[in-house]
Image (tube, rainbow, N blue to C red):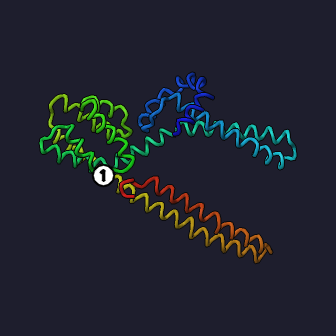
């Protein structure tokens, strides 16, 4: 995010944001989990700023459009004011809660690499290397982009403040509950002198079991969505095409039937396909993209 935009939003809404921070006690933690380097009041200012921009741009266009259809400038302006205000609150709310969505995306990707991450860590731990050395060596391997947002800060903190403080900070900002549990276990074992290698082997077996369960659940859902898609696209298209053809022949609505068939082919079927792709991407484990 541009520093200029942040400063501008603070100039316009900074004073109000200071009072609104207390209404969102979880925002600071959400920003940490999403790896956003900004303070809660800055994020609130940005959400109000983007909502204000949407209000400013939508008000004149909606006013002209609604005035034209309502044939009354006053009615059109009142409706556009209500519509633009709704857009303002909607945009502000969506942006305000966007860090939660980012944190969930990071957590999903981290959860999918955890079985293989813990397996690699257990192999390194079996060589009796110190924990900070194990994590630093593991950081040289390739990771997905979002998983890097968890691994890289941990490695950087280890080199700056040591393994103890680095693990404490990583536990606090971890987006994934499973990753937090793994780090907390490593931190406890490091303090008590437990067997890190055995712990990592056990965690890798647990995470691999969960990963296989997710793949099995994904296969089941994929089959269900495929059946729904085939019914929605093929069966429904054939049914409506035949139905419109019959009505066109009986009722003399040939032109309307052709228009409705065009609308079905050009808009409805692509829209169903797009929704299907979005749903499929949402349920797909990120490690098998």
Q: Tell whether 37 sits left or right of 183.
A: right
Question: Furthest-right residue in view?
Answer: 71
186 relative to 215, above or below: above
Q: Residue at x 44, y 34 (%)?
A: 37
Among the 4 quarters of the image, the one containing residue 198? top left
Q: Residue at x 51, y 56 (%)?
A: 278
Q: Tell whether 108 sits left or right of 276.
A: left
250 relative to 87, above or below: below
> Where does label 1 land, which residue?
142
Q: Residue at x 60, y 36 (%)?
A: 92
Query: Where the C terminus falls, by quadrant?
Result: bottom left
**Front residue of this view, candidates 16 and 2:** 2
Q: Residues within 10 Å of mark 1 (few under 14, many from 20)?
A: few
Horizontal and vertical percent position of residue 29: 43, 31
Question: Furthest-bottom residue in view?
Answer: 249
Q: Residue at x 52, y 64 (%)?
A: 229
Among the 4 quarters of the image, the one containing residue 106? top left
Horizontal and vertical percent position of residue 174: 36, 37
Q: Tell whether 119 sits left or right of 142.
A: left
**Front residue of this view, candidates 196 and 131:** 131
Q: Secondary structure at mark 1?
A: loop
Horizontal and vertical percent position of residue 244: 70, 72
Among the 4 quarters of the image, the one containing residue 175? top left
Q: Tell whether 2 sits left or right of 205.
A: right
94 relative to 16, above or below: below
Q: How many marks?
A: 1
Horizontal and vertical percent position of residue 237: 61, 70
């Amino acid at each position: 995010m541009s520093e200029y935009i942040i400063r501008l939003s603070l100039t316009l809404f900074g004073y109000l944001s200071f009072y609104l921070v207390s209404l969102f006690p979880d925002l600071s933690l959400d920003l940490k989990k999403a790896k956003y380097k900004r303070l809660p009041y800055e994020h609130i200012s940005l959400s109000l700023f983007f909502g204000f921009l949407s209000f400013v741009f939508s008000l004149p266009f909606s006013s002209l459009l609604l005035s034209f259809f309502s044939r009354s400038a006053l009615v059109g302006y009142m409706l556009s004011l209500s519509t633009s205000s709704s857009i303002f609150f909607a945009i502000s709310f969506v942006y305000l809660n966007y860090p939660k969505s980012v944190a969930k995306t990071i957590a999903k990707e981290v959860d999918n690499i955890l079985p293989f991450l813990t397996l690699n860590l257990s192999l390194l731990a079996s060589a009796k290397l110190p924990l900070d050395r194990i994590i630093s060596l593991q950081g040289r391997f390739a990771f997905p982009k979002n998983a890097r947002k968890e691994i890289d800060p941990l490695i950087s903190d280890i080199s700056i403040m040591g393994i103890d403080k680095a693990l404490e900070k990583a536990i606090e900002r971890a987006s994934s509950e499973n990753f937090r549990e793994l780090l907390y276990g490593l931190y406890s074992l490091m303090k008590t002198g437990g067997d890190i290698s055995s712990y990592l082997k056990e965690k890798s077996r647990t995470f691999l079991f969960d990963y296989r369960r997710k793949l099995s659940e994904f296969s089941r859902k994929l089959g269900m969505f495929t059946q729904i898609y085939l019914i929605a696209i093929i069966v429904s298209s054939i049914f409506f095409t035949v139905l419109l053809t019959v009505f066109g022949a009986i009722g003399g609505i040939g032109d309307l039937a052709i228009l409705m068939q065009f609308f079905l082919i050009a808009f409805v079927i692509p829209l169903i396909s797009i929704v299907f792709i979005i749903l499929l991407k949402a349920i797909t484990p990120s490690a098998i993209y």
